[in-house]
Image (cartoon, rainbow, N blue to C red):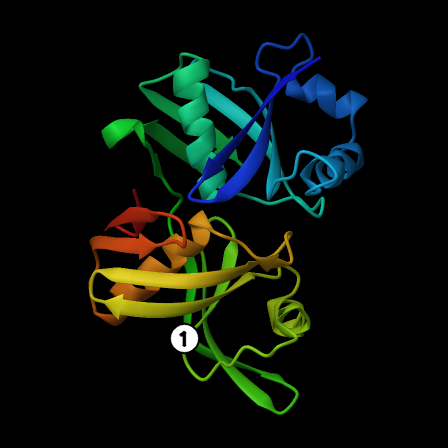
Amino acid sequence: MADFIKMQGTGNDFVIVDITKSETPLEKAKIRFSSEDLSQLAIKICQRRMSIGADGLVILSSGPQKNQLEWKFFNSDGSHAEMCGNAARCVALYAISHLNLGPLVEIHTTAGVIRGQRGAHDHPKITMTPVTGFKEKQVIHLGDQSVEFDYLNTGVPHALHSRNFEVSENFRQQFSLLRNHSNFQPQEPTSQIVKVIDDYHVRSASFERGVESFTLACGTGAVAAAFLHLNRIDKAYGTVRYLFPVAIAMLKLVKKVFI
């Protein structure tokens, strides 16, 4: 039997299954439970109103050394994700508060190592993986509409739209066509509409892959929007306040890494 906890970060909610103290480590659990089994578990657990309900499922296990953790992350549709910023914040806080790890925790994800610690007012603070694959002013065609976007990877890929992009009433179909466009294969991105408020404030709406809808928050998406904004105002470093619908996050860029 494994313990679980439900947590949320800026409105992004997750079920975290803790097997750090289990007699069945993650590697052994992989033998007993295949990725397909865990994928189906994520679909059942994350279903809202009929189950616990969440944007994603985290299977958390001990890492090779003290203060290190490993995870497997599944979106609510059962697909695997390389990383999730808000889930990493939740795991960092859980590790420090409930597992007595820290003051610095390393979370090993498919995208790389995320370092977490307790920040001001007990809020978790994480160091993201470096931004990669940045491509500006890309264009694809959806029917008779030309869609301009900027592409980058902040642990997971993102396509950001801030010019000449109108959301239709049938937005799910529209964003699904966009994400599954041949230009993005084999790794479709989360799509975002970005709005700059001023030099220090940015907001965006994220249509997340694996959830197939807009979510209240997307941590890697916030980093992507902040990076794009700082790049456009020609800043190699700086701090941006990112405005989520239910919270505000402070994002600081240092040498292409957000903390």
Q: Is residue 134 left or right of residue 13?
A: left
Compare residues 254 and 196 and report the one nearer the observer.
196
In the image, residue 102 sits, relative to residue 93, either above or below, namely: above
Compare residues 215 and 2 and report the one nearer the observer.
215
Q: Secondary structure at mark 1?
A: loop
Q: Which quarter shows the N terminus? A: top right
Give me the residue at 71% from left, 42% from top.
Answer: 47
Amino acid type at circle 1 is: Ser
- How far across and how far down the image is residue 36, in percent? 79, 37
In the image, residue 184 sits, relative to residue 65, either above or below, namely: below
Give me the residue at 68% from left, 43% from top.
Answer: 48
Q: Is residue 4 left or right of residue 35?
A: left
Within the image, what quadrant is residue 142 found in? bottom right
- How far across and how far down the image is residue 15, in percent? 60, 32
Outermost front residue: 49
Give me the residue at 70% from left, 41% from top.
Answer: 49
- How far across and how far down the image is residue 22, in percent? 64, 10
Q: Is residue 154 left or right of residue 70?
A: left
Give me the residue at 62% from left, 67% from top.
Answer: 179
In the image, residue 136 sits, relative to residue 188, either above or below, namely: below
Q: Is residue 254 visible?
A: no
Which residue position holds label 1? 162
Q: Which quarter shows the C terminus? A: top left
Outermost top residue: 23
